Image: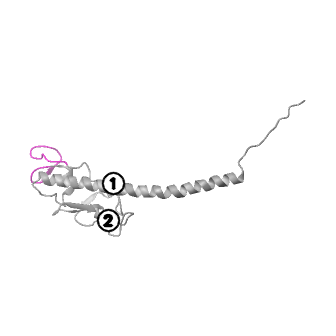
């Protein structure tokens, strides 16, 4: 007697494939919005962190220079280079240039249409990421009032 060889073909039915596709669609519909909200939260955290870094550097500069804030025109040099008591700057720490540097680099603006800009100025200008008021030492994001986060708060109010 010959042994009967059974060959059975195993495969997925059309119903099983449709169910898997529907499940993947539901997972995608839930996961994609969550990931986009996470990216916005990361941008907001980066903005808050960058502002804290800049504000701390400005306050430290003022503390070491008799309450005088960095000048808007020379903001980068005063925070990135060594300085003396009268706010003169030098690339190396020699002689009277004993203060600073307060930052390694000006952080880039992480939000808004001017995202990626690192410049600092007293008013809105091309290539400027931060608006700085030298009389009060305040700094804010260079964003239009219409640019807001997910909860409706303006980026320039942080």
Q: Which residue is rendered at x = 41% and y = 56% of the image?
A: 39
Location of residue 58 (image quadrant):
bottom left
Residue visible at 72% across and 46% down? 11
Mark 1 — residue? 46
The image shows residue 73 at horizontal and vertical percentages of 19, 61
Image coords of residue 47 (percent x, y): 32, 57
Residue 32 covered by magenta stretch: no
Image: magenta residue range: 83-101
Mark found first going from the N terminus, 2 or 1 = 1
Q: What residue is shown at x 78% (from left), y 41% (from top)?
A: 8
Query: Residue 89: x, y in percent?
Result: 15, 51
* Residue 86 is covered by the magenta coloring: yes
- Looking at the rendered image, the disc whose residue lies closer to the viewer, 2 or 1, is 1
Return the residue found at the far right: 1
Whether residue 77 is visible here, answered yes or no, is: no
Q: Determine whether the residue tagged by mark 1 lies in a helix, strand or loop.
A: helix
Circle 2: element type: loop
Between the residue at mark 2 and the residue at mark 1, the CA separation in whole angstroms equals 15 Å
Q: Quadrant of the C terminus?
A: bottom left
Please say if 51 is above or below 104: below
What residue is at 33 percent from the left and 54 percent from the top?
46
Q: Main secondary structure of the magenta part?
A: loop
Across and down, in percent, residue 57 comes to 20, 52
Q: Nearer the viewer, residue 140 or 17?
A: 17
Query: Is the N terminus in the top left, top right, bottom left or bottom right quadrant?
Result: top right
Q: Which residue is mark 2?
A: 143
Drawn side of residue 133 relative to residue 19, left or right: left
In the picture, residue 137 is in which quadrant?
bottom left
Across the whole image, how many numbered discs are drawn on residues? 2
Q: Is residue 6 left or right of residue 142?
A: right
């Amino acid at each position: 007697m010959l042994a009967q060889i059974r060959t059975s073909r195993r495969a997925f039915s059309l119903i099983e494939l449709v169910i898997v596709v529907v499940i993947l669609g539901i997972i995608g519909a839930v996961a994609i919005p969550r990931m986009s909200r996470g990216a916005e939260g990361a941008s907001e955290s980066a903005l808050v962190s960058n502002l804290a870094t800049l504000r701390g550097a400005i306050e430290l500069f003022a503390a070491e220079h008799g309450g005088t804030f960095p000048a808007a025109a020379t903001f980068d040099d005063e925070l990135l280079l060594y300085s003396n008591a009268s706010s003169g700057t030098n690339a190396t720490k020699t002689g009277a240039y004993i203060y600073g540097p307060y930052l390694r680099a000006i952080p880039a603006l992480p939000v808004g249409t001017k995202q990626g800009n690192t410049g600092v100025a007293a008013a809105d200008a091309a290539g400027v990421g931060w608006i700085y008021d030298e009389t009060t030492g305040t700094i804010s994001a260079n964003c239009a009032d219409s640019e807001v986060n997910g909860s409706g708060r303006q980026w320039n109010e942080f």
